[in-house]
Image (cartoon, rainbow, N blue to C red):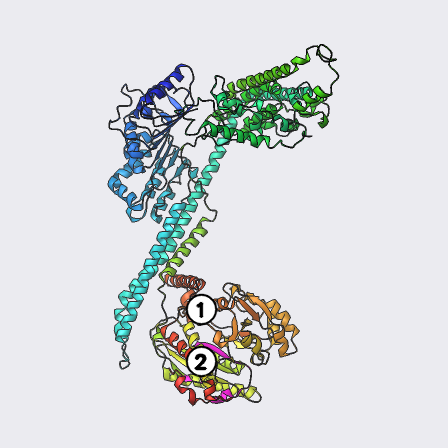
C-alpha cells in the first residue's frame, strides 16, 4: 500500500517514482493519491496487473483514460475519483484512440465541479464492453444518467446517490428531462440481462407531478435480472394507483429477493396526509361558520318561518362539507389499501428469497458433490496439519520445560521489560542505514497481546523507517523531539506494567494449551485465518525458536484455508456446508494423538526467574573462579569474556527473531496474517440502511395515518363552541329561602343536566336524593318552551311529593332549574356547557342564602344515575365536612349499571344483583378504563365491614386511589374547587373524561373512594348523541370520531402546558361575576352583621340575574 501526496511542482517526480517501482518489480495493490494529475496515468497503468484499489482525491486534468483506457483488463480494480476534483482548462481527450481500452471493475465517481457529468460522457464514448461491472455515482440525480442507459444495461450493480436537494429542485430536474425521456430510460434499463443491484435513494417523487413509482413497477415487470433494488425517497408520495402498478410487477417476478423498505416515503406520505387533513378540516370549519352566519342573519322572532331561507342557502355549503368529510374518509381507506399492497409486496419478496435460498442450496449441494473427492483430500491434509501443529507445539513445550529454550521460560511481564527487543527511540537510529521494519514492530509480542497503537500520523505504529525529511509525507510538521516523546510514552506505558512486579506464577504456555484444546472442540475453524493468527501471536511471545518451528505448518494451514475459500467462491456454497464434507471424512482425535506424545513435566513457577536476576545470581553466588578466570566447572571459556558472550547470544537471538519475522511477512499471501502500512478511511459505496419491514405493516400504517390526522386536526385548533352559548338562558326555578334553615356543617348539591326526553330519569334521581339540586335542561329548537316548562314543573312536583312521603321530619328537597334553548337544528348536545351552567347556578343559589361558599359542596353526576338510599345521609353527616371541605379531597362515589330497568337502592340489594350477574361496575365490560381505578373489590371488602350502617365507619374505611388516564368517576368535592368543563366537548364521548383530567391535574391525581354508598344506572337506550358518533359506519361517523380524537389530543396538550379549559364568553362572564360576588361578600361580612339566615334583599345588588 502506498499513499502519495504532491504539490504542483513534483507531480512528474511522483509519476517517475511509480514507474521505478513497477520496473523494480514492486507492484502495489493499493494506492491513495492526493493532488495528482493526468501525468501519472501511464505510471498507474504499470501497476494495473496487481492494483486492487485506487483512490484519487483532488485529481486534476484529463481522467478519461483512467475511466476506460486501461491497456489490459482490470476486473478486480476498485477506483474512486472525483472527490474535490480540480477543474482544468483543457478538455478531456479521447480515452481510447486505438479503440481498445478497459475500465475498472468497480468505479466510484464523485460529481465535484461537474466531473461526474464529464465522466459519464467519457464512458458513453465506449461502444464496446470495457469490463465495468459496478458503478457508483455520488452527487448526481439518476435522471442525469439518461444518456448513459446503454452503459447501465451492461452493469451488474448501479448505485446513484444524489446531493442534498429540495423537492422543488428534484421536480425541476424532472421537468427539464420530460416524462417521455424518463419513461424511455426505464424501458432501456429494463432490457438489461446483467443488472442485479439497483440503488436510487432520495430521487423518486410521486403525487400529481410524477409517477416514478409506477415506472419502477413497469421496469420490474419487464426486467428479470434485478435481485436487489432500493428506491426509498424522502420526496416519494405513495398513491394507491402507483402502488398497484408496483404490486403487479411481483405476480411473475421471482428474481427480486431484497426490496428496501419505504420508510422515508412512508414518513413523507404521512406528512402529506396530515397536511391534507388539516386543509379539509379548515374547509369544514369554514363552511360551518358560513352556515351559522346565514342563520344568524335571517333570525327573526316575529317570523315563524325564518329558517326557510337559510335552509335553502346552506345547501352548497352542506355539499362542500360532505365532500370534505368523504375525502377525509378516503384518505384513511387509501392508506389502508397502500399498506395492504405493500404488505403483499413484502410477502412476495420474502417468498422469492426463500425460494432463491432453496435453489442456491440445491445447486451448491450439486457442486459440492462434484468436488467431494477434492474436499476429502483437503480433509486429510487438514487432519495432517492439525497433527503436525499439535506435535510441534508439544515438542516446543517439552523443550521449554527442560529449559532448552530460555525464552520459553520467561514470564511475559519480564519479557516486555527489555528495550533491546524494540527499535531505538532515538532519531539517529531511525536515520541510519539499518532502519527497523514496520513488520518487525507489528509482530513484536506486545502488539500481539495488547495491540498498542500510538496515534502517529494516522499510522498504526508509533515510529517509521522513512528518512526524516521535511518533504516526507510521514514527517508532517512534527519534530524529532515529539516523536521521541511519543516513543518514550509508549515505553512508559509498557514498562509501567512491570514496575514493582515479581515473576508471574502463570504458565506462559497456558494460552497455547487453550488453543490446542480448541482443535478438538472447534475442529472446523482450525485452518481459519483468525485461528492461525492467534497461534502465531501466542508463539511469537514464547520465543523465536517456537515461531521458526511452526512457521511451515502455519503456511500449510493457510494454504488449505485459501483452497477452501476458492472452492466456496466457485460453488457459491456456505462455509458450513463445505466444512461438513471436509470434516466428515476422517475425524481428528486429539486425545488419541496426545496419548502418543511425550509427557510434559508440570509447570513450576519457582523455576521462572528474570534473566537479569539470573545473571546477577550467577556472578555473585557461584563458586570461586579458577586462576585462569574460567568457571570452576561446566565450562572452559574465560570469565572475562562472559559479558561479550551474553551480548553475542542476545544479538544472535535478535537476528533469528528478525529472520523469522521477515520470512513470515514474505508469506503474507498465505492469508494467516495480513498487514497494511496505511489504514485510511476510503469513501466507498454507501450501503442502504437495510431497515427491516415491520411485521405488522398494515396495522402500524393505519395507526400512523390516524395519528397524523388527529394531530393535524388538533393543530388547527378550530373546534366549535356550542351555538347556544351565545343565547340567553332562562332561570325557571330557584331555591326557596326556607332551604337555608339547615344546620349541617356541609351542604352537598346535586349538579346534573338533561334534555326533555330524560325527565323521568330526573324524577327518579331527585326522589332518591331528597336534597338540593341544580339542573340545566336543554330544549331543542323544535320544542316549545311553554310546554316544556309545564312538563318540567309537573315532574319536579311529583318528585317532591315522593320525597315527602318517604322522608320523616324536615324535608330539604329543593331544585334550581335553568333552561337552555337550542338555536340550530341538528346541533350537538352541549353537555359540558350545560354542566357549567348547572355548576355556576349551584354556587349562585348558595350565595343567595349564605355568606360564602365555605360549606358548599357538589355531587357531579349524570341524570341516568340513581343514588343509594343512604348517600344523602352519609354526605351530610358531620364526618363528611373534614375530608371534603377542610382537607379539600376529591371523593369518588362508586358507579354501577344494572342489566335491566330495576335498580337496587340499598347496598345489600346491589350486592345481590352483582352476585347474580345482573349488575356490575359501570362500563367495566366494554370500557374498563373509565371506572376500574375505583377498585371495586376493595369497595366491596370495605363496605361489608360497615354493613351495620354506621356512618362514621364509611368515612373511616375510605381508601386512597390514584388517577389513571381516561378515568371518569362521579365525585363529590368543594364547590369552589370544581374547575369548569371544556365546552368544546359536545355530544357523546370523552366529555366527562376531560373534566376529570382537569380535576386530577389540580389535585395531583389523588382521590378517595367512599365505601357503603353508590350510584346505579338502569338499562336505557342509546342517546341521539351516541348514534351520531358511533352509529352506522359512514363517512359522517368516521369524521365525528376523528374530530373527537383530535379535540381530545388538543385538550391534553393544552392541559399539559398548564392551560385552562376552553369556555364560552358567557360562561367566563358568569364565573367572573360570581368571583366578584364572593369577594364582595367577604369584604362586607362584618358590615352586614350576618345572621344564621342571611337577608336576601341585602345581596340583590351583588347577584347576576340571567
Residue 1099 painted magenta: no
> Which image quadrant: the C terminus?
bottom left
Closer to the camera in the image, 266 or 913: 266
Cβ atoms under marks 2 and 1 closer than 8 Å: no
Q: Quadrant of residue 470?
A: top left
Q: Which residues are magenta?
A: 732-755
Q: Nearer the viewer, residue 1046 or 792?
A: 1046
Q: Furthest residue to the front?
A: 627
- When asked about the image quadrant of residue 56, the answer is top left
In the image, residue 154 sits, relative to residue 956, either above or below, namely above
Left or right of 385: which side holds 927? left
Q: Which residue is mark 2?
A: 1078
As rendered, which of 751 and 248 lies closer to the eye?
A: 751
Give the SS element for disc 2: helix
Secondary structure of residue under mark 1: helix
What residue sits right under mark 1 in the picture?
991
Q: How far is the residue under mark 2 from the one under mark 1?
A: 28 Å
The first of marks 2 and 1 along the sequence is 1
User: Where in the figure is residue 1086, as x and y percent of width and height?
Assistant: 47, 86
Q: Is residue 223 left or right of residue 184?
A: right
The answer to whether residue 541 shows anywhere in this view is yes
Amino acid at each position: 500500500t502506498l499513499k502519495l501526496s504532491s504539490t504542483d511542482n513534483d507531480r512528474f517526480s511522483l509519476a517517475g517514482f511509480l514507474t521505478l517501482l513497477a520496473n523494480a518489480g514492486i507492484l502495489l495493490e493499493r494506492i491513495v493519491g492526493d493532488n495528482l494529475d493526468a501525468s501519472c496515468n501511464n505510471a498507474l497503468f504499470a501497476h494495473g496487473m496487481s492494483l486492487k484499489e485506487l483512490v484519487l482525491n483532488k485529481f486534476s486534468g484529463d481522467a478519461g483514460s483512467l475511466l476506460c483506457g486501461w491497456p489490459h483488463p482490470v476486473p478486480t480494480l476498485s477506483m474512486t475519483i472525483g472527490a474535490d476534483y480540480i477543474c482544468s482548462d483543457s478538455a478531456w481527450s479521447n480515452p481510447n484512440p486505438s479503440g481498445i481500452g478497459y475500465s475498472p471493475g468497480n468505479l466510484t465517481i464523485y460529481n465535484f465541479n461537474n466531473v461526474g457529468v464529464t465522466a459519464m460522457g467519457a464512458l458513453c464514448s465506449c461502444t464496446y464492453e470495457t469490463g465495468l461491472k459496478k458503478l457508483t455515482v455520488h452527487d448526481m440525480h439518476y435522471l442525469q444518467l439518461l444518456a448513459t442507459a446503454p452503459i447501465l444495461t451492461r452493469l451488474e450493480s448501479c448505485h446513484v446517490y444524489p446531493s442534498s436537494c429540495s423537492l422543488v429542485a428534484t421536480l425541476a430536474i424532472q421537468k427539464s428531462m420530460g416524462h417521455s425521456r424518463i419513461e424511455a430510460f426505464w424501458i432501456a434499463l429494463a432490457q438489461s440481462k446483467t443488472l442485479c443491484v439497483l440503488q436510487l435513494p432520495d430521487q423518486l417523487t410521486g403525487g400529481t407531478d410524477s409517477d416514478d413509482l409506477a415506472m419502477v413497477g413497469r421496469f420490474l415487470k419487464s426486467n428479470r435480472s434485478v435481485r436487489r433494488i432500493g428506491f426509498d425517497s424522502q420526496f416519494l408520495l405513495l398513491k394507491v394507483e402507483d402502488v398497484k402498478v408496483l404490486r403487479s410487477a411481483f405476480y411473475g417476478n421471482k428474481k427480486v429477493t431484497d426490496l428496501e423498505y419505504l420508510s422515508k416515503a412512508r414518513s413523507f406520505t404521512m406528512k402529506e396526509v396530515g397536511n391534507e387533513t388539516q386543509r379539509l378540516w379548515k374547509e369544514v370549519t369554514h363552511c360551518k361558520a358560513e352556515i351559522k352566519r346565514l342563520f344568524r342573519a335571517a333570525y327573526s322572532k316575529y317570523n315563524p318561518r325564518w329558517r326557510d331561507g337559510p335552509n335553502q342557502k346552506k345547501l352548497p355549503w352542506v355539499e362542500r362539507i360532505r365532500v370534505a368529510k368523504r375525502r377525509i374518509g378516503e384518505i384513511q381507506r387509501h392508506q389502508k389499501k397502500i399498506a395492504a399492497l405493500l404488505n403483499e409486496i413484502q410477502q412476495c419478496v420474502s417468498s422469492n428469497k426463500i425460494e432463491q435460498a432453496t435453489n442456491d442450496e440445491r445447486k451448491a449441494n450439486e457442486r459440492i458433490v462434484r468436488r467431494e473427492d477434492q474436499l476429502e483430500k483437503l480433509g486429510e491434509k487438514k487432519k495432517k496439519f492439525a497433527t503436525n501443529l499439535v506435535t510441534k507445539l508439544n515438542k516446543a513445550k517439552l523443550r521449554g520445560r527442560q529449559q532448552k529454550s530460555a525464552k520459553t521460560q520467561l514470564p511475559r511481564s519480564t519479557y516486555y521489560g527489555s528495550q533491546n527487543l524494540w527499535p531505538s527511540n532515538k532519531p539517529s537510529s531511525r536515520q541510519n542505514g539499518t532502519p527497523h521494519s514496520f513488520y518487525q514492530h507489528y509482530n513484536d509480542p506486545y502488539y500481539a497481546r495488547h495491540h498498542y497503537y500510538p496515534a502517529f500520523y494516522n499510522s498504526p505504529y508509533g515510529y517509521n523507517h522513512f528518512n526524516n525529511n521535511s518533504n516526507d509525507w510521514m514527517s508532517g510538521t512534527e519534530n524529532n523531539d515529539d516523536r521521541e516523546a511519543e516513543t518514550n510514552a509508549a515505553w512508559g506505558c509498557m514498562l509501567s506494567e512491570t514496575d514493582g512486579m515479581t515473576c508471574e506464577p502463570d504458565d506462559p504456555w497456558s494460552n497455547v494449551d487453550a488453543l490446542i484444546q480448541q482443535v478438538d472442540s472447534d475442529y472446523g475453524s482450525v485452518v481459519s485465518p483468525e485461528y492461525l493468527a492467534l497461534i502465531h501471536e501466542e508463539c511469537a511471545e514464547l520465543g523465536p525458536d517456537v515461531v521458526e518451528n511452526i512457521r511451515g505448518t502455519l503456511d500449510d494451514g493457510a494454504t488449505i484455508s485459501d483452497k477452501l475459500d476458492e472452492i466456496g467462491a466457485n460453488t457459491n456454497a456456505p462455509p458450513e456446508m463445505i466444512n461438513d464434507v471436509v470434516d466428515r471424512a476422517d475425524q481428528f482425535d486429539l486425545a488419541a494423538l496426545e496419548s502418543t506424545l511425550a509427557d510434559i513435566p508440570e509447570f513450576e513457577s519457582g523455576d521462572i526467574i528474570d534473566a537479569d536476576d539470573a545473571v546477577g545470581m550467577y556472578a555473585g553466588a557461584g563458586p570461586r573462579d579458577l586462576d585462569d578466570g574460567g568457571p570452576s566447572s561446566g565450562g572452559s571459556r574465560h570469565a572475562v569474556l562472559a559479558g561479550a558472550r551474553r551480548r553475542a547470544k542476545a544479538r544472535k537471538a535478535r537476528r533469528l527473531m528478525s529472520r523469522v519475522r521477515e520470512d513470515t511477512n514474505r508469506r503474507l499471501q498465505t492469508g494467516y496474517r495480513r498487514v497494511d502500512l496505511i489504514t485510511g478511511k476510503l469513501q466507498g459505496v454507501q450501503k442502504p440502511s437495510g431497515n427491516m419491514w415491520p411485521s405488522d405493516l398494515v396495522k402500524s400504517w393505519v395507526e400512523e395515518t390516524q395519528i397524523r390526522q388527529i394531530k393535524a386536526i388538533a393543530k388547527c385548533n378550530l373546534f366549535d363552541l356550542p351555538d347556544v352559548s351565545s343565547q340567553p338562558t332562562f332561570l325557571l326555578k330557584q331555591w326557596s329561602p326556607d332551604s337555608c334553615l339547615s344546620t349541617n356543617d356541609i351542604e352537598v348539591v346535586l349538579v346534573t343536566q338533561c334534555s326533555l326526553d330524560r325527565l323521568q330519569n330526573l324524577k327518579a334521581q331527585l326522589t332518591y336524593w331528597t336534597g338540593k339540586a341544580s339542573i340545566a335542561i336543554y330544549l331543542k329548537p323544535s320544542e316549545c318552551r311553554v310546554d316544556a316548562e309545564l312538563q318540567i314543573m309537573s315532574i319536579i312536583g311529583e318528585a317532591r311529593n315522593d320525597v315527602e312521603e318517604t322522608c320523616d321530619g324536615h324535608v330539604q328537597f329543593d331544585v334550581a332549574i335553568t333552561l337552555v334553548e337550542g338555536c340550530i337544528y341538528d346541533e350537538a348536545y352541549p353537555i359540558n356547557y350545560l354542566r357549567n351552567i348547572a355548576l355556576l347556578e349551584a354556587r349562585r343559589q348558595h350565595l343567595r342564602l349564605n355568606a360564602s361558599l365555605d360549606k358548599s359542596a357538589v355531587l357531579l353526576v349524570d341524570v341516568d344515575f340513581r343514588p343509594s338510599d343512604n348517600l344523602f345521609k352519609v354526605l351530610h353527616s358531620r364526618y363528611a365536612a373534614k375530608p371534603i371541605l377542610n382537607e379539600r379531597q376529591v371523593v369518588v362515589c362508586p358507579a354501577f349499571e344494572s342489566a335491566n330497568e330495576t335498580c337496587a337502592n340499598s347496598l345489600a340489594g346491589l350486592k345481590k344483583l352483582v352476585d347474580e350477574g345482573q349488575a356490575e361496575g359501570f362500563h367495566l365490560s366494554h370500557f374498563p378504563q373509565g371506572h376500574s381505578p375505583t377498585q371495586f373489590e376493595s369497595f366491596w371488602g370495605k363496605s361489608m365491614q360497615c354493613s351495620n350502617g354506621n356512618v362514621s365507619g364509611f368515612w373511616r374505611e375510605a381508601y386512597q386511589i390514584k388517577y389513571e388516564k381516561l378515568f371518569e368517576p362521579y365525585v363529590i368535592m368543594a364547590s369552589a374547587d370544581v374547575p369548569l368543563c371544556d365546552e368544546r366537548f359536545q355530544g357523546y364521548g370523552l366529555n366527562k373524561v376531560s373534566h376529570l383530567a382537569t380535576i386530577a391535574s389540580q389535585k395531583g391525581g389523588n382521590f378517595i373512594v367512599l365505601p357503603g354508598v353508590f350510584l346505579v344506572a338502569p338499562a336505557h337506550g342509546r342517546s341521539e348523541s351516541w348514534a351520531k358518533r358511533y352509529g352506522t359506519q359512514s363517512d359522517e361517523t368516521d369524521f365525528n370520531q376523528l374530530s373527537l380524537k383530535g379535540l381530545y389530543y388538543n385538550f391534553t396538550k393544552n392541559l399539559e402546558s398548564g392551560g385552562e379549559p376552553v369556555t364560552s364568553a358567557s360562561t367566563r362572564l358568569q364565573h367572573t361575576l360570581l368571583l366578584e360576588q364572593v369577594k364582595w361578600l367577604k369584604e362586607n361580612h362584618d358590615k352586614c352583621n350576618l345572621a344564621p339566615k342571611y337577608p336576601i334583599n341585602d345581596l340583590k345588588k351583588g347577584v347576576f340575574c340571567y
